[in-house]
Image (cartoon, rainbow, N blue to C red):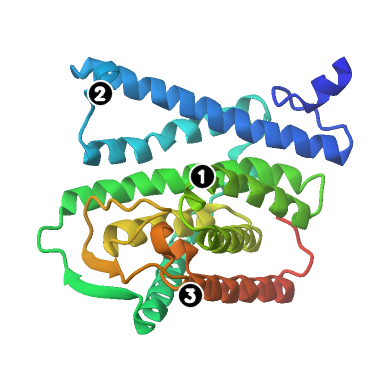
Amino acid sequence: MKQLLKKVSPFNNITEMPVSLFIIKKILAFWVCYIAGLFIAEGLVILLHFALGKNVLVGDVFDAGTITLITYYGYIVIAGVALLYWKVIEKKPLAAMGLSKKIGTYFIGIAISVFLLVLSVIIIIVTGNIKYQGIFENADVLMIILLTGGFMIQGAAEEILCRGIVLHALKEKTSFLTAMIVSTILFILPHWSSLFAGEIIYGVIGVINLILISAIFSFLTIYFKSIWAACGLHSFWNAILYSVLGLNLSGNEETVTAIFHMQSVSDNIWNGGIYGIEASAATTIVLAFAAALLFVMICRYKGKAQI
């Protein structure tokens, strides 16, 4: 038993073990980095409150906008823990987790996010389930810029964990399909509670869409041999959806500020109800098409090549 626990422990870089144990080891590594990052970030936020004269014990906290910024910028701690883990425990260079010199592919990810979101929203508008109400008259440009920075950190942190630590580590010992499935499950779990806050149908569609977008992140990673494109797509999907279009982001109904003013018309499977367009059937269609296209591109141009 002691030898077994030593093998699956995420605090060493032992790799000689059955594939099933190696998968468990990397799942544990994911949760160690994620939970440790959350605890450290929460502690820093509490200290920041007290340092600035706020007493969180009696509910004296920053305003909603500041809390939102702190939440997203706090992901830099999770990213930092994950990168430290990779360097100190895994003892591997950052390029081995996909943080290669191909940083230019980040902008390809941004372009893909714009295309996928615009197409999804157009479909929903055409069906009459989102109403475009013009441009926000008092849009807070500085807040939008700051939020975009926060989303860049948050998206990169999640990709470092899921496509960096998990996908890259597992593909060395398992098939790419297995590595993708495990990283997708770990990607979905932190979203689970908000997915099923409303009617179950939106939760089910939301899970399908998360599977599809995670597959797209993985396909981009293997196609470009880098996680930069996935980071760009992930980050700017959130930034554009929330701060440009002014729509729900993963069930967050309270938009701090945005450029455009859009609003769902009732709750149905076309606009995703309380969860937003990420639980929309229109988004499912768009993401399924994109995932299939990327899969064909990989099969045609990469064959069985690995990252």
The Cα atoms of the two marked residues, 3 and 2, are separated by 40 Å
Amino acid carrying label 1: it is: Ser
Q: Name the residue beneath numbered marker 1.
A: 193
Report the front residue among 199 and 91: 199
Quarter residue 139 falls in: bottom left
Q: Is residue 138 above or below residue 34?
A: below
Q: Which of marks 2 and 3 precedes in the sequence?
A: 2
Determine whether the residue tagged by mark 1 lies in a helix, strand or loop. Answer: helix
Q: Secondary structure at mark 3?
A: helix
Front one among 85 and 286:
286
Residue 50 place in picture, x, y as percent: 25, 16
Contact (CB < 8 A) between labels 3 and 1?
Answer: no
Q: Residues within 10 Å of mark 3 (few under 14, many from 20)?
A: many
Residue 161, image x, y percentages: 58, 41
Asked if the residue under mark 2 is in contact with the one under mark 1, i.e. CB atoms within 8 Å, the reply is no
Position of residue 172 in the picture relative to residue 271 (left or right): right
Q: CA distance from mark 1 to mark 2?
A: 24 Å
**Considering only vertical position in the picture, is 205 above or below 11?**
below
Q: Is residue 262 visible?
A: yes
Q: CA distance from mark 3 to mark 1?
A: 22 Å
Q: Position of residue 142 (x, y in %)?
A: 18, 49
Residue at 61% across, 32% down: 31
Under mark 3, the amino acid is: Ala
Residue at image location 76% in from the left, 55% down from the top: 176
Q: Earlier in the sequence, mark 3 or mark 1?
A: 1
Q: Residue furthest left?
A: 137
Q: Earlier in the sequence, mark 1 or mark 2?
A: 2
Residue 123 location (% of width, % of height): 41, 80
- At label 2, counting other C-alpha atoms closer than 10 Å, the crowd grade (few under 14, some 14-19, many 20 or more) is few
Residue of label 3: 282
